[in-house]
Image (tube, rainbow, N blue to C red):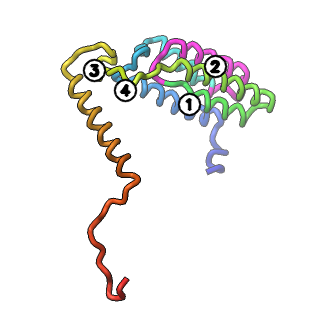
């Protein structure tokens, strides 16, 4: 595999990585139907920030410091917007690439800056209050609709099954009687 990757153009490898990370973010944008309380829907700005977060994966070999600056700045703005997809994977991939292809001083500075930005992004994620029922159709904790009772019943059944499973963990559950073979074992 190393020989096959060694013969590929480095820009193509970086392009594939950037596209894969962007595709994962885009998938989260498109397939997230229910926002958590405090999250904002996907807008044109969200898509632009996602491009600015992922594109530096393409440019990190020629412009490592500028690439890190663009990615991390876009990630901070993105985190402040409380959008759906978490940008941590793109930041991790860029930090890994910088560590592989840049000077040690730039790689260490990137590692610390990335850790700070990921910490900010995690801190900005909306908190989920387990005591507040969330509607599965609107994402709003106060919304009343026909699917709410069914969703709450489903959640209760799931929690009850988890409790029953936890209760059975420590006990030995009797099974069918064991039959002895001819040797008497």
Where does residue 44 sit, x and y in percent of width and height?
45, 12
Which span is picked out in magenta? 57-85
Per the image, the residue denoted by label 1 is 89
Checking the image for residue 72, the label placed there is: 2
> Upstream in the sequence, badge 4 or badge 2?
4
Per the image, the residue denoted by label 3 is 137
Query: Would residue 1 be found to the left or right of residue 64 on screen?
Result: left
Residue at image coords 36%, 88%: 183
- Residue at the extreme left: 146
Closer to viewer: mark 4 or mark 3: 3
- Residue at the extreme bottom: 183
Viewer-closest of 51 and 167? 167
> Upstream in the sequence, badge 1 or badge 3?
1
Distance (Cα) linking label 1 and label 3: 28 Å
Query: What is the crowding at mark 1: few (fewer than 14 residues within 10 Å), some, or many (at least 20)?
Result: some
Quadrant of the drawing holding the C terminus: bottom left
Distance (Cα) linking label 4 and label 1: 18 Å
> Upstream in the sequence, badge 4 or badge 3?
4
Determine whether 5 is above or below 146 in the image. Answer: below
Per the image, the residue denoted by label 4 is 31
Residue 54 placement: quadrant: top right
């Amino acid at each position: 595999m190393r020989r096959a990757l060694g013969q590929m153009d480095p820009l193509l490898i970086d392009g594939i990585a950037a596209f894969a990370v962007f595709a994962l973010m885009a998938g989260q944008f498109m397939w997230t139907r229910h926002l958590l309380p405090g999250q904002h829907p996907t807008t044109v700005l969200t898509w632009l920030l996602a491009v600015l977060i992922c594109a530096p994966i393409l440019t990190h070999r020629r412009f490592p410091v500028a690439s890190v600056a663009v990615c991390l700045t876009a990630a901070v703005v993105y985190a402040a917007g409380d959008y759906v997809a978490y940008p941590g994977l793109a930041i991790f991939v860029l930090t890994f690439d910088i560590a592989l292809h840049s000077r040690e001083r730039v790689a260490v500075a990137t590692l610390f800056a990335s850790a700070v930005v990921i910490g900010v992004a995690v801190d900005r994620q909306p908190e989920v209050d387990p005591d507040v029922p969330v509607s599965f159709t609107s994402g709003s904790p106060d919304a009343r609709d026909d699917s709410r009772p069914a969703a709450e019943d489903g959640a209760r059944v799931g929690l009850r099954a988890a409790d029953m499973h936890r209760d059975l963990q420590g006990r030995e559950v009797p099974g069918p009687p064991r039959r002895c073979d001819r040797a008497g074992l």
